[in-house]
Amino acid sequence: MKSSVITFPGSNCDRDMDVALTKFGFKNKMVWHNDRELPKSDLIVLPGGFSYGDYLRCGSMASKSKIMNSVINFAKSGGLVMGICNGFQILVEAGLVPGVLLRNKYLQFICKNVHVKVDNKENTFFKNLDKKVLEFHIAHNEGNYFCTNDQLKEIEDNNQIAIYYCDQNGNTNDQINPNGSIKNIAGIFNKEKNVLGMMPHPERMIDESLSGEDGSIFFKNLLNNIK
Amino acid sequence: MSVNEKIAIEHGLKSDEYKKICKLLKRIPNITELGIFSAMWNEHCSYKSSRIHLKKLHTKGKKVIQGPGENAGVIDIEDGDAIVFKIESHNHPSFIEPYQGAATGVGGIMRDVFTMGARPIANLNSIHFGSTQNKKTKNLLRGVVHGIGGYGNCMGVPTIAGQTSFDRSYNGNILVNAMTLGLVKKDKIFYSKAAGLNKPVIYVGSKTGRDGIHGASMASASFDEKIEEKKPTVQVGDPFTEKLLLEACLELMSGDSIIAIQDMGAAGLTSSSIEMASKGNLGIEINLNKVPCRETKMTPYEIMLSESQERMLIVLESGKEELAKKIFDKWNLDFAVIGKTTNTKNIELFFDNKQVANIPVNTLVENSPMYDRKWKKSKLPKKNKINKTIFKNLKIKDTLKKILSSPNVCSKEWIWQQYDHTVMGDTIQKPGGDSGVVRVHKTDKAIAATVDSSATYCWAHPLTGGKQVVCETWRNLISVGAKPIAVTNCLNFGSPEKEENMGEFVECVQGISEACKYLDYPVVSGNVSFYNETKDIGIKPTPTIGGVGLIKDYKKMITMDFKEIENIVLVIGKTEGHIDQSLLSRLILNENNGPPPEVNLFNEKNNGLTLLNLIEKNFIKSAHDVSLGGIITAISKMCIKGNKGIQFKKPKSLINEIEYFFAEDQGRYLIEINTKDFKEVSKILDKNSVHYDEIGTIIDKDMIIDQKTKLTIDELKSYNTNWLKSYMD
């Protein structure tokens, strides 16, 4: 399976994502933001980081990069696209997934392990996943998901919420919500569910010596689903 | 403007120094030249008060590839790999403007490391604030933490460990010391020594603005009530540009175009160009009209003294300009050929086709002032006679509660959760342990790093304190299973013009040197920060030591959390009951006098190396060094982290129970071993003459001290974790 990771100026999880994808069997290529063409890929990943320094709204500059036209076309034609952290912010700014990401509720960068509940398995990203709750890692300053009531209704009607922040038993409540996201939303799909944006970093949880191993479960499952 | 002595003094130079400049030049300098001299001759850049003493530091060792004198130190970690590391202070700017001061401190130290060709793989910091009652403390802490995070997080370099302390002596002068480690191949290290004539001198990175002019001079003076006016001397950081600069420099470094490279840190273009010329015994010629500027009408004086961040100066191989330019264009960074190397041994500056400065390089470097300042020897204070009945009235539970929730012992999670500590995917021990540990990417090796200081001990007796700090970092490394290799030091003191402060400096340095020599743990880099003083009140002497060690097989790394019930816990090293200067003494007994705990270097080395041997043999399940707050504080942390309890065994020691639990004797560790290994472990300890006590057995929950004294793990947790969070909310 072929994957591509886009490097924007200021991306800093691009290498980590490359390491993770390669580890689980993807043939991965790094793609420069200024390129126009995407290599032939089964999966495109927009990695975490601070694209263009995120001095403007996070992800807004990167969403206008040259390569993004190709990414948008790829997504619209049904290709799998995943945005992690800053990548999620870029997807939002590019209009590929609904909503916006605000500054964390407590106005602080947060770096820690979190649990997420996987509710929707009728999609390529989470299909056949054995577990309902995964332990992932977050590291962000602007991950507070927000959308209008109308949007929320539409998102829920279309089953677009991918993962929720929860406790280790899968309970979602305010106390466990790390950043103030509406409905504890940690990740969201587009309508067709071929585009996934999420704040947590599965690529930081890929071996037992790191913060955890649930990232491995996610990537292995993803690879099997694409095959 | 014509220069005179008054203007020179306004530049921070002394009258004698101005006369020396005139004598060296055989004429009166013009204003640009005076600016250059003031920048090169201030304390921060010239080390004029400290040089003579720093020479005494122990800096040599088998693993040292580069000692002090370069952008950073370099050590060998085998297999052709090397670690580049250094710690640096950014105290003065952080007090004036905490966010930018701390941020640019982090940016500056990372630049020092990647200037040498190394990719930064870990950041650490040691930050010190005034009393928690001081009204400025909260905002300063918040600003500094945001600044450190803001820069490091954006760069994508994990912040893996640190230290935070509060003490009244920092009320008017906080300390922000930032440390970075980078990874490089041994044969791809870059240095700042220029070589060859007529080689192009290249400016890359951000444009030059008016920010930070005289920053280094500001950092070389005490504060007074006009401190607010100094805000414009604080630089403004742009981590995004630095990230681009990092990637661009490493890309250029993968080829063979660079002869020498130097970041523009303190004293900007002035010190970078002069250092490269000086090391290469060359001259350098710069056309200041070619320097990319972000503001209009900047004068030569301003261009030379600006401390705008994220800039580098490179001496390139002739003919490689196009190739280099392409790389910097790709990363959207400025690139300009601004001059060339010459054989004049002078620095010659041109602006609007006129020569605006012409100074022999050696007058700025070798001939810079060096002072052997007067210093006062300190005496070892007399031991306090503590009435033992006081101990009888102390309840262990209450005392422990106070200590665990005290500002200097409590969990610093509120701080390190704001730092990205997992980016780069190799952090295998996060902040909150004895050392931070990162794997060497795609290998079985790991690097452990820690940063520490003990201002109270140093204040009570500088010589002992200096030794103790080195030993503390040594123990932190051993506790995670790393073989200590070398250190970097950041020497924070008051005004060197006061005999007492200078004495503290001299004796701390002596202590550091003795310990480093004995432990074969050399100093490879560092910096000195004097004048941490406001309205005549100086800080406690605070030498900060950053220690680095190697774990050959990262799977053998040790953490402090208790692992398994029924395992037994031993204390390695003898507990004599030293209470003076301990947290118990200062916090509970309100007694601030007396000597710090004695440091016995033989025991320190012997205990440490024996523990490493036990770790190597897989006997150790968890380990933690005993420091502030003594044995019971250390055990509490092991319980909290492992979510397990302990049943204490009555100590055999003859001393009082309170003394046994809270004493801060040095050279001690707590270790967890399996019962079946006890015989073998005790044999090894005995054979090496290492004293040990069996202190307890790990149980499912609760810390049971005796029949009457019991604490739940949740109690311990809430004492330890809540304080800082509620203080900051």
Image (spheres, grey):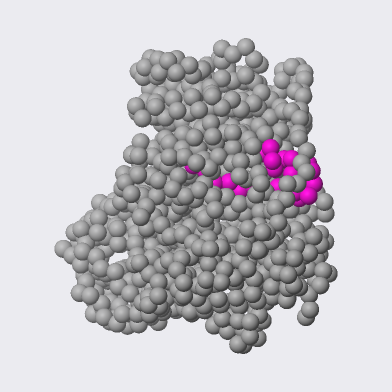
Q: Nearer the viewer, residue B105 or B495?
A: B495
| B527 relative to B617, above or below | below
Q: Quadrant of the N terminus of chain A?
A: bottom left
| Residue B608 visible in the current orientation | yes
Residue placed farthest to the bottom in the image? Answer: B352
Q: Nearer the viewer, residue B431 or B604?
A: B604
Image quadrant assignment for residue B561: top left
**Left or right for B589, reference B262:** right
* Residue B286 placement (x, y as % from top left): 56, 77
* Residue B48 placement (x, y as % from top left): 69, 53
Residue at position x 51%, y 32% in the image: B519
Residue B499 falls within the magenta-colored stretch: yes
Q: Nearer the viewer, residue B379 or B134?
A: B379
Residue B520 falls within the magenta-colored stretch: no
* Residue A141 placement (x, y as % from top left): 51, 63
How many discs mark residues in the rendered view? 0
| Residue B149 visible in the current orientation | no
Residue at position x 75%, y 68% in the image: B22
Q: Give the magenta range.
A: B486-508
Image quadrant assignment for residue B471: top right
Q: Nearer the viewer, residue A192 or B603?
A: B603
Residue placed farthest to the left in the image? Answer: A227
| B558 relative to A107, above or below | above
Residue at position x 25%, y 68% in the image: A29
Residue at position x 47%, y 50% in the image: B66
* Residue B397 placement (x, y as % from top left): 64, 27
